[in-house]
Amino acid sequence: MKKSLNEVNPVITSHDVGLKRVLLAANESGCSLTQIAVTDLKAGEVAQAHIHPDMQEGFFVLEGVLDVKLDDEVLHCTKDDFVYVKSLTSHELRAVTDVRIMTIGCVIESQQSKLYPLLFEPNLHEVVWGGQKLTVWKGLAAKDHIGESWEVSCVESSPSVIANGTWTGYTLKEVIKKHPEAILGREVSKRYGGELPLLVKFIDARKDLSIQVHPDDEMAKRLHDKNGKSEMWYVLDAEPGAYLYSGFKEKLSSEAYKRKVADGTIVESLAKHEVKAGDVFYLPAGRVHAICSGILLAEVQQSSDVTYRIFDYNRPGLDGKPRELHTELAAEALNYQVEKEYRTEYATGSNRANSVVESPYFSVRVTEFSDTFHRNLIKYDSFIISMCLKGDCRIKVRSTGDEITLREGYSCLIPAAIADYDITPLKGSSKVLDAYINNMDKSLLNKVSRFLHISMR
């Protein structure tokens, strides 16, 4: 086979910058090569950071000056320089001048089809305050007292089971153990010891939940050898007049708190908030709270099942016995300070990702879209949990071509290595809530080096 570069028609690259001429395509090579191509970038053009879970790549500079960023290292390349990129390595190409490069890609066949957006079997929890909304919403057989749907979980007592693809029937925890960095992200895997740090749920409160509080990391580790729990609520639906409790409206001492629990008046000291769809509350560990009747919401939290129950309205549990209270533990965990505002304000807008919560434990974005929406979240070096709040949608991964249908009322986990995807509404418009760990600017050194790198342009 012989080809002349000038006779090959240029096409736009998969990153929507620059033009490439494919000299050898995958279907022509008869081996694991994906392609050999010559790509032209104009000065200032950037092929944004991305990861190939199943491919190695090489870049040979034919003309010009190119900066290649591999993870956090920037390589300054000129004519005749060659850069090799291993699979699962984040890489970004920045043309310092007009540049021409030869790109060579090679598939690691053993990795193919192992990473894809993961769907899960229903994981429903029966509680005294639950109703039937979750089963109806999910299209399942109606069942009473279903208060929680654990959408994505690696909690030992109730792990998520994968419902699609190669890993059908495996628990999420089992699969993460096989590919911790590729699924969680390198930084997340390192920081959390290869464990998924988040738990997400849908919650249906037909009746009031107990007044409760969660310990912080230090207390939970010391007493239970578990994570603490900070969490957030995104209200999906609320009956007229529905309300919840978040925080104190008056400052109490530990002793005053215990007296109010004992005489059943603790509710009188809580900040009460009427709510509507779209309201958000961030609940750091130590903040007293309770969801009350008539509310359906999405919850994102640290992966922990440690809860201290303060007051439960003197009602019996499903077994007919009073549920256990944790008055003393809660007294130690509580933050008794009074805040001016407990509701979280955020900007809204269609066809863009709206930042809802940015905390030390997780970031949350909500996106409502009526057309195909591209999301490249590789830069965060994190898994993405997507909860479909409205309207079925299709998620298609750019690097592998894998796609799934994410139904309203269900959730998926997109591995960190393939978190560059298009999401398309299937019925008019869709709304998704994304939760992940934001690892950008994870050190002052990275911020400074990035600034110096840019300022030298």
Image (cartoon, rainbow, N blue to C red):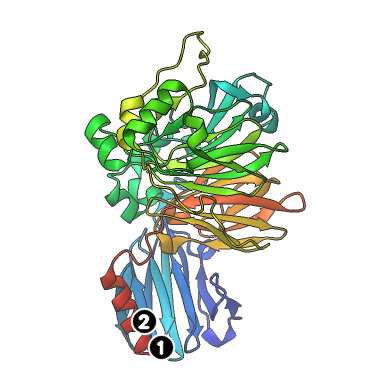
C-beta proximity under 8 Å, tags 1 and 2: yes
Horizontal side of 64 relative to 356 (left or right) equals left
- Looking at the image, residue 403 lies above or below residue 174: below
Give me the residue at 30% from left, 46% from top.
Answer: 192
**Foreground: 58 or 281?**
281
Q: Which residue is mark 2?
A: 67
The one nearer the camera, 39 or 161, is 161
User: How far from the left and from the top, in percent, is residue 92?
Assistant: 41, 73
Query: Where residue 368 sits: x, y (%)?
Result: 66, 56
Residue 209, percent across and down?
A: 54, 28
How many numbered badges does the structure rendering display?
2
Location of the C terminus (image quadrant)? bottom left
Q: Residues within 10 Å of mark 2 (few under 14, many from 20)?
A: some
Residue placed farthest to the right in the image? Answer: 428
Residue 445 percent coordinates (x, y): 26, 72
Of residues 252 and 457, which is closer to you in this image?
A: 252
Residue visible at 55% across and 74% down? 13
Give the answer, above or below, for where 51 lies relative to 452: above
Q: Secondary structure at mark 2?
A: strand
Q: Is residue 421 visible?
A: yes
**141 to the left or right of 155:** right
Q: Which mark is residue 96?
A: 1
Between discs 1 and 2, the one toward the N terminus: 2
Eyeballing the image, is 376 above or below 391? below
Callout 1 secondary element: loop
**Residue at 35% from the left image edge and 74% from the top image edge:** 69
- Amino acid under disc 1: Val
